[in-house]
Image: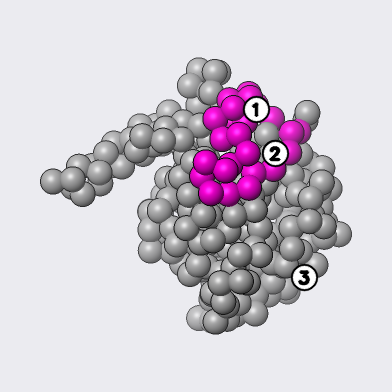
Amino acid sequence: KWNGSQLNKLKAIILAAGKGERLGDITKNIPKPMIEVEGKPILEHNIEMCKQARVKDLFINLHHLPDRITEYFQNGKKYGVNLTYLYESEIRGTAGALLPIINKLGNPFLVIYGDNYSKFNLKKLIQFHHEKDSDFTITLHWRKDTSTSGVVEINKKWKIIKFIEKPIPGEIRSNWVNAGIYIINPAIIKNMIKPNIDFASNVIPLLIEKKCRLFGFKMDKKVYAIDTPRTLNETMSQTSKVSDSVHN
């Protein structure tokens, strides 16, 4: 098993640059990762998730209303982490965001989509990645409706054999979808990182084609992807129910 000193060396990039255009007026004056769930911004939940796993060196990429994020979190000291901000004058894509820091991230490193909300123990993912000798591990969660997600098919050894972003009905037989949390060994993606590329559309399908060691870690927590007013309302309603049941 990995020890604490190895965990302490892990770094993460939290992706927070997106405009959240599908949320309409909701994101006109607030970046999507700053929408509050259970009393605090989604981004704060993600920073706390890293801190709980002793991952304290965090990069956050920014584009839409960056000051709202930097003024709120500042250098991260208040949250027990070290924050480095990466401003993008033009959005580079989820994988393209790594361009300025790919050589600084260490081996391996974490990628977290800053607009997804879950209460997840990152240590379990890190341990799984290590035990499987994985090159790239995707955290998965189960969804009944997979039409708006990246859907993943794995074999009995947890290896990813198929990945389709937003599949048409019948295209893939799986209800396990991309939860937006990865742990990656940089060597396998270093030569692929350039502006305007995404993990889901470009990087992951190519790595599967190359028969790299990609594994799927099935999480036992629910993930709330806040993309539209409908999913935001569902998140608010379901998390408040969870919150009420905890308090009662």
Q: Which is nearer the N-term, disc 2 or disc 1? A: 1
Residue at image position (13%, 46%) is 248
Residue at image position (54%, 18%) is 29
Q: Which is nearer the N-term, disc 1 or disc 3? A: 1
* Residue pointed to by mark 1: 66
Query: Horizontally, is 111 left or right of 143 in the view?
Result: right
Q: Are marks 2 and 1 in contact (CB under 8 Å)?
A: yes
Q: Position of residue 130 (x, y in %)?
A: 60, 77
Q: Do the residues labelled 3 and 2 touch (CB within 8 Å)?
A: no
> Please, what secondary structure does the residue beneath circle 1 have?
helix
Q: How far apart are marks 3 and 2 (CA)?
A: 33 Å
Q: Where is residue 91 in the image (x, y as percent from the top left)?
A: 74, 34
Question: In the rendered structure, which segment of residues is drawn in magenta?
Answer: 63-88
Q: Position of residue 244 (x, y in %)?
A: 20, 42
Query: Horizontally, is 92 left or right of 121 in the view?
Result: right
* Residue pointed to by mark 3: 210
Looking at numbered disc 1 in the image, what kind of residue is underneath it? Pro
> Please, what secondary structure does the residue beneath circle 3 have?
loop
Residue at image position (72%, 67%) is 107
Looking at numbered disc 2 in the image, what kind of residue is underneath it? Tyr
> Please, what secondary structure does the residue beneath circle 2 have?
strand
* Residue pointed to by mark 2: 85
Between disc 3 and disc 2, the foreground one is: 2
